[in-house]
Amino acid sequence: MKTSAQAFVQARAAIPGGVNSPVRAWAAVGGAPLFISRARGAYITDIEGREYVDLVCTWGPSLLGHAHPQVTAAVREAAERGLSFGAPHENETVLANMITARMPPAFRIRMVSTGTEATMTAIRLARAVTGRPFIVKFAGCYHGHSDSLLVAAGSGVATQGLPGSAGVTAGTAADTLVVPYNDEAALERVFEESGAKIAAVITESAPANMGVITPKPGFNRCIRRLTREHGALMITDEVLTGFRCSPAGYWGLEAGYGPASLPAYLPAAAMQGEEERRQWQKTQLAQAQYVPDIITFGKIVGGGMPLAALGGAPEIMDRLAPVGDVYQAGTLSGNPLAAAAGIATLKYADEAVYRAVDSAAEQLTEGLGAEFDRASVPFRINRAGSLFSVFFGREPAENGVENYAQARAQNTAAYTAFFHAMLDGGVYLPPSCFEAWFVSARHTPQVLDRIFAALPNAVNAVKKALG
């Protein structure tokens, strides 16, 4: 039987670094990454036949659990009709309407294949709409790997300790203004100095790529106020949080959309008329704390298959070709298999699913906290809906984690020790302290018990690492 270590050696001969996305290489925690052969429910199994409780959930999409029978059945049925058409099909409209019904600011939808494509297109749209060059982003927020957004990015860039990326020109980087997250005063200053040149502010609704960090009360509203005052757009990145933090993402969580607020999807006929759609949207948004101009989606929206999207008001989205002058295209955009997976995922992501996921996250974070307290391990757990992450060390324990600088002050060696001890106990964590943890509706009390059983040894490993 081939081991993961042997598979990694072979992969490195054929693939740069042996992986097709950098965090998978385990550079932050060391060792050979697991090579996975199957995933089902709350578990993954490696090529050596070992089973692990999965707290990565394919970085978010597995809200219902791996290989959900209705989702896989929908994909099989779609595959029998053809893998790709390169032409319109009705399920694109069905999925677009399902997205809008949950997140009314996304009135018109354009589908792409990756979150990077979605944010890249949102940036291009913002520059076209405003006629301005500058984009404001927050340090530690990750919005995909397009050139202008890799400056002071989180996720794999943070994991590898990079300030940005080789291959990004100085001119491109100069058009990106970086501000500390959760710092309203700093954002005010940037607009005072460069407001006439700022096309948009892009932000994760709740950052989850430097570890999970929640916006301070009113911070997202501050972004909305400043962009409106200065004629810029607000782009909200819900690639990770969309349809996971709540039925309407983190935007919905702030707007008070709980599990019981799931929309009864409007019949297709009711969503076809422009005036009827506009009136419906106006009603839905009447009580919203803030309404972004563009929202980007990924992960859950494709049900685990390559599909992402961006949405916004008609006057913005209709600038996209073929209606408008902003070009964007993709042979596999709206792929029929991915659309089928997305439709099935959103269809079965009902009130019971959100209650189960929220309950699992609450039980797990409380259990982790109790074990750390018992062992006098300094820590901080940040949570946004069912997304959460753990920061070890005195700095996060005493001062909290509200921005990238504070996230980087955690004890990374302690997380590495914790990761490997939990892995030895049959629990698969994110292989980086700068990533979010995920649970699914299949993380039942019995599954959580397996996690808790691995905790004592892992906490002892953390104590040794902390010294």
Image (cartoon, grey):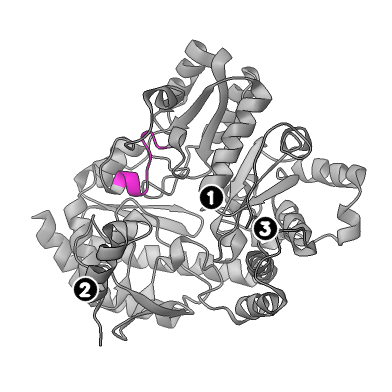
Could you say where residue 344 lies in the image, as x and y percent from the top left? 67, 71
Q: Quadrant of the C terminus?
A: bottom left
Quarter of the image where one finds residue 85: bottom right
Quarter of the image where one finds residue 74: bottom right
Q: Is residue 458 left or right of residue 429?
A: left
- Name the residue carrying label 1: 115
Main SS class of the magenta portion in the image = loop
Disc 1 from disc 3: Cα separation: 13 Å
Q: Is residue 343 left or right of residue 7?
A: right
> Is residue 374 visible to us here?
no
User: What residue is drawn where x is 25% and y is 64%?
Assistant: 13
Which residue occupies the foreground of this view, 37 or 437?
37
Tag of residue 334: 3
Could you say where residue 378 lies in the image, as x and y percent from the top left? 22, 53
> Residue 181 lies in magenta, yes or no?
no
- Name the residue carrying label 2: 5
Q: Which of the marked residues, 1 or 3, is nearer the chain's N terminus?
A: 1
Q: Amino acid at mark 3?
A: Gly
Q: In the image, which is nearer the foreground, mark 1 or mark 3?
A: 3
Q: Amino acid at mark 2?
A: Ala
Q: Is residue 110 above or below residue 24?
A: above
Q: Is residue 362 above or below residue 233?
A: below
Q: In the image, which is nearer the foreground, mark 2 or mark 1?
A: 2
Q: Is residue 353 above or below residue 177?
A: below
| Residue range (magenta) | 150-158
User: What residue is drawn where x is 76% and y is 37%?
Assistant: 318
Could you say where residue 446 lies in the image, as x and y percent from the top left? 42, 83
How many other residues sit within 10 Å of disc 1, few (<14), some (14-19) or many (≥20)? many
Per the image, label 2 sits on a secondary structure element best described as: helix
Q: Amino acid at mark 1?
A: Gly
Per the image, label 1 sits on a secondary structure element best described as: helix
Q: Quadrant of the N terminus?
A: bottom left
